[in-house]
Image: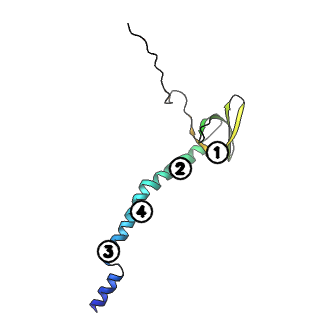
């Protein structure tokens, strides 16, 4: 009787099966915190950016175009990329706001003065 129970326990995976299941669960948890969760945060931030777009915002598209928003609709935005030049792009192609002004990380060109 005891031998048949031992054989059934080994066939079902025994104690080694629990270790394998714990390993798989731990692996999934690591993948979630390293890959899935940061991607979800980034997607949420992008959705908030898109929902907060308004006329006059300077944005950059995923293709690298920089323009000022003239019209915002449900699926599209109209950007003015130069004086009188307007293009329509999908709202989802807006990558982010284009920072100009004092908060922008602009490259500084230092005038080198000769010290005498």
**Helix, strand or loop under label 1:** helix
Please indicate whether residue 103 sits to the left or right of residue 26 in the image. Answer: right
**Helix, strand or loop under label 2:** helix
Name the N-terminal-most of marks 2 and 3: 3
**Residue 51 visible somewhere in the drawing:** no
Q: Quadrant of the C terminus?
A: top left
**Helix, strand or loop under label 4:** helix
Q: Residue at point 60% right, 37% down?
A: 59
**Alpha-carbon distance for marks 1 and 3?**
52 Å
How dense is the environment of label 3, judged by Cα within 10 Å: few (below 14), some, or many (20 and up)?
A: few
Q: Residue at point 42% right, 62% down?
A: 28
Name the N-terminal-most of marks 4 and 1: 4
How dense is the environment of label 2, judged by Cα within 10 Å: few (below 14), some, or many (20 and up)?
A: few
Name the N-terminal-most of marks 4 and 2: 4
User: Circle 4 sits on which residue?
Assistant: 28
Q: Residue at point 35% right, 70% down?
A: 20
- Extreme residue toward the left, this view: 2
Residue 82 lies, in percent from the top left, at 67, 30
User: Circle 2 sits on which residue?
Assistant: 44
**Alpha-carbon distance for marks 2 and 1?**
15 Å
**Alpha-carbon distance for marks 4 and 1?**
34 Å
How dense is the environment of label 1, judged by Cα within 10 Å: few (below 14), some, or many (20 and up)?
A: some
Name the N-terminal-most of marks 2 and 1: 2
Please indicate whether residue 75 sits to the left or right of residue 101 in the image. Answer: right
**Alpha-carbon distance for marks 4 and 2?**
22 Å
Q: Would you say the residues marked 2 and 3 are in contact, meaning their CB atoms lie under 8 Å apart?
A: no
User: Circle 3 sits on which residue?
Assistant: 16
User: Circle 1 sits on which residue?
Assistant: 91
């Amino acid at each position: 009787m005891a031998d048949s129970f031992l054989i059934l326990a080994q066939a079902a995976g025994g104690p080694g099966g629990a270790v394998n299941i714990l390993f798989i669960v731990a692996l999934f948890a690591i993948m979630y915190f390293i890959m899935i969760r940061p991607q979800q945060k980034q997607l949420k931030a992008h959705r908030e950016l898109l929902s907060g777009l308004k006329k006059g915002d300077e944005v950059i598209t995923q293709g690298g175009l920089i323009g000022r928003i003239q019209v915002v609709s449900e699926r599209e935005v109209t950007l003015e990329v130069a004086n009188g030049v307007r293009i329509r792009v999908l709202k989802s192609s807006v990558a982010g706001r284009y920072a100009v002004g004092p908060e922008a990380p602009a490259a500084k060109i230092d005038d080198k003065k000769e010290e005498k």
